[in-house]
Amino acid sequence: MTTALEAIRQATDLLRFVARVDRSNLSDDEQLQLLAAEEAAGRFADTCRVLSAAETADRSRYELGSAGLSMRHGERKPTIFIEQITRVSQSEASRRIRIGSAIRQRQSLLGETLPAERPIVAEAMINGLVGVDAAHAILFSLKQAATGSEATPERMDAAELALVTAATTQSADLVLDEGRLWRDAMDPDGIEPRYEEIRERRAIVVGRERNGIKKYTINATPTLSAVLDAALLDSMDPKAPPRFMSDEDRERASIEIVDIKGTPTETLHDPRRLEQKRHDILEGVLTAGLRA
């Protein structure tokens, strides 16, 4: 039994104990500390998983034929093989392979050990500083930037360092936003084609009506996304008063309470699910716009 396998089994036993902790008994400070500590542990776990996925895929590569690891277990594609072992989705298996392949050491044709394709990302992940979502955002941005006319090796290294540094203090979404800025700076000629591609992909697909419900699928451009997000913003704010409620919903939501001074007051508790709130808000905004 290898040292790594024994270590992961010990870690699993410890995490099994943590999973059974009743978090409702923790103080606010204890809960926040646990939340941060769990995420730190998860980053190490994610690094292990992507590295193992990449190693498994490398041992299952096509040129090995029947001698490949996945082929010896009856599966030609390493992504499906990893999916079967780990029970994750194929898309997640593919993502792990891509990230792991970018941060694992490589070998030359002569068998020499080469550094990782993205050594700064690799060092940050191995040290638990960057999570898998942020790593994916960084690698995706760098891949898009690499074909740009301004993507010199020095600038690519600078972009990788800047994005990794940002990922140690910011969310993966913000890192992706910063990655787009680096991509556009190193591939200025691609800005217009990317915009045209977005415009070409814009669409609203109308499905058939079934049981009184008709499904609409929207591929929104950034402009429409901003409009929809602005319209639906209140639906995500628990402090915002209910909007566009039907008479039936309002009757179900109305309750009477007495405040600390004994004064009867009426308050509304919205009985609708989040998805229903968004539907009603969108219906109300569109109806008001048509009337105007």
Image: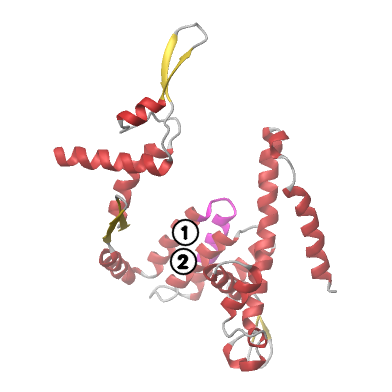
Of the two numbered discs 1 and 2 on the same chain, state the one appearing first in sequence: 2
Residue at the spot x=25%, y=40% of the render?
A: 285
Quadrant (top left/top right/bottom left/bottom right) for the C terminus = top left
Q: Name the residue under label 2.
A: 141
Question: Are the two marked residues, 1 and 2, in contact with CB atoms closer than 8 angstroms?
Answer: yes
Mark identifier at residue 232: none
Q: Which residue lies furthest to the front in this view?
A: 211
Residue 241, located in which quarter of the rendered image? top left
Mark identifier at residue 176: 1
Magenta segment:
159-172
Quadrant (top left/top right/bottom left/bottom right) for the N terminus = bottom right
Residue 80's x, y, as percent?
57, 77
Residue at the spot x=31%, y=32% of the render?
A: 246
Amino acid bearing label 1? Leu
Which secondary structure is most common in the magenta stretch?
Answer: helix
Between residue 78 and residue 223, name the one nearer to us.
78
Q: In this view, does 242 lie to the left or right of 35?
A: left
Task: Determine crowd level at label 1: few under 14, some 14-19, many 20+ residues with C-alpha closer than 10 A.
Answer: many
Q: In this view, does 244 lie to the left or right of 37?
A: left
